Amino acid sequence: MQLGTTHLNPSERQRRLTQSLCLYCGDPGHALPVCPIRPPRPMVSTIFSFLPHMKSLTTHGTLTTARTSVTVVALLDSGSAANFVSGTLCRQLGLRTKATATPYQIQCITGKPVSCRRVHHSAGPVLLQVGLLHVEETTFLVLEESTADIILGHPWLEQHNPILSWSTGEVLKWGDTCFLGCFPHLPAPHSSTPIPLPVQATSIKSPLVNQPLRIPTCYAPFSDVFCPKRAFKLPPHRPWDCAIDLLPGEPVPRGRIYPLSVPEEKAMEEYVKEALAQGYIRPSTSPAAPSFFFVAKKDGGLRPCIDYRALNRITVKFRYPLPLVPAALEHLRGATIFTKLDLRSAYNLIQIREGDEWKTAFITPTGHYEYLVMPYGLANAPSVFQDFIHKVLREFLHRCVLVYIDDILIYSRSLAEHRQHVAEVLGCLREFQLFLKAEKCSFHQPSVQFLGYNISSSGIQMDEGKITAVRDWPAPATVKELQRFLGFANFYRRFISNYSSIADPLTNLLRNKPKSLL
């Protein structure tokens, strides 16, 4: 007799059915669902829209894999004890699934199990983007009969703690942890104005909208190299850590606290909070204290800056050379296909040499901190990073790779050769825990814009945008304006026959260091 199992051979199963015996234990007097010795199945409660006149609270999100990206409708369900993805969507995206340790029985609002809704597999991890800002890596249980693309249940709501406006259908505020882990790739918010995320009361049926992704399918095994969340963590110490050696006898640089506007104070608080959580900075007792301030970006945002000018004046310079771009471009002869890669958070991929952290200290109106990673603004930062990335990609240099600080160009003579080159470079970046901005990468292109040049199989040409800028440049009225114009135009002198003769009338105006052009 088979005891304690529902996997019965046909003859035993028929015998128990004929004699009205329990299919689990074989005893009379009860059926399998209420067997007293049968271990309870794991239950995952969930609540679906169950009244015809009611609408579900939903939001639009994006699920991204290395192969593709789709826009989905996500049902926000505080009564669900787990996050679910529909079986149909799971297969469409080609998500990796694995069997759960034990099947889950779905339980409805009445507390009774829904026998047709059992969950046997989980899927992921996969990148989930909600709105324009909120990005995370998450795992789902696969629900075959779900009418929603995905269900974001109580665990998701508890983790992100969104504050919803039930009257307007917006997320008024995300939880504090979201600014540390879910969109660290964006500048910290510098306004107290809530960031609205439309959350509409709609039906949960919506067609999937395919969105082209920049990453070709053949590089799916390297999807982790493009994961933004993995990029924002403290890098390991390496032999190429940024050393800051000071000239002997020089005083420690000090700055002053700059007054900040209310939006700048908010941005500063978020920047410090985020950098502390990532491990990029720590509280400091250093005697050094350069100033912290903001400069405006072209998009209206704020870029944090630290005044390291005094530190740079007393720093022993590291003279590793940056590539001569015109000479480096000569190696592209014969190439017909190009891929351009952009490193994410480039300088922050290098740690400060242990013991030198105090030299990077800076002050804010509310604290004193020092960097553990290489910040922007250090005199040696470009050379240190160029040395580092050259060592990382040394085996590919002048063979199929041109790299200038955080810009990487891969070039090949054929598509088959190119795919092999790109895969090798991605594997190398993964080995050194370097990550890329997928949104700024271009794959398998016949021509690319790189370092101000238009590069193709036909050769190297000037960037049309820069030609237009020179053509439309307003007439210089001061010495500084003239110097600025000549410096910009000089970038393309190799393309202009007799450039020196053409520019000579202007350069003559700068002889003897005049104070004005009049």
Image (tube, rainbow, N blue to C red):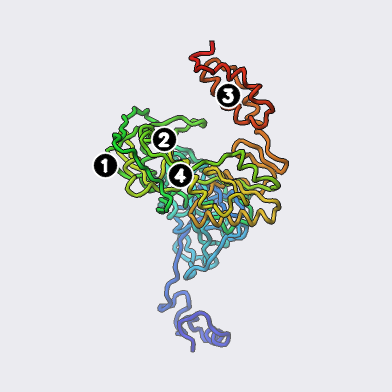
Is 449 on the left-hand or right-hand side of 114? right
491 or 133: nearer the eye? 491
Q: Is residue 28 above or below residue 68?
A: below
Residue 419 % position (x, y): 65, 55
Q: Is residue 126 above or below residue 306?
A: below
Task: Please report whichever mark, 4 or 3, sits nearer to the chain's N-terminal start.
Answer: 4
Residue type at the position of mark 3: Leu
Q: Which mark is residue 486?
A: 3
Which-is-in-front pick, marks 1 and 4? 4
Q: Which mark is residue 285?
A: 1
Which residue is found at the position 64% from the left and 57% from the top?
420
Is 501 on the left-hand or right-hand side of 273? right
Residue 64 shows up from this direction:
yes
Residue type at the position of mark 4: Val
Residue type at the position of mark 1: Thr
Mark 4 is surrounded, within 10 Å at the Cα level, by few (under 14), some (14 to 19) or many (20 or more) other residues, namely: many
Residue 188 % position (x, y): 43, 39
Task: Please report whichever mark, 2 or 3, sits nearer to the chain's N-terminal start.
Answer: 2
219 or 418: nearer the eye? 418
Q: Quadrant of the C terminus?
A: top right
Real-space CA distance between mark 4 and mark 2, rounded to the nearest whole angstrom: 21 Å
Reading the image, the residue beneath label 4 is 384
Which residue is found at the position 49% from the left and 68% from the top?
100
Which residue is found at the position 63% from the left and 21% from the top?
503
Total marks shown come to 4
Task: Please report whichever mark, 1 or 2, sits nearer to the chain's N-terminal start.
Answer: 1
Real-space CA distance between mark 4 and mark 3, rounded to the nearest whole angstrom: 29 Å
Outermost residue to the front: 512
Reading the image, the residue beneath label 2 is 304
Which residue is found at the position 71% from the left and 53% from the top?
414
Give the quarter of the image for residue 454. top right
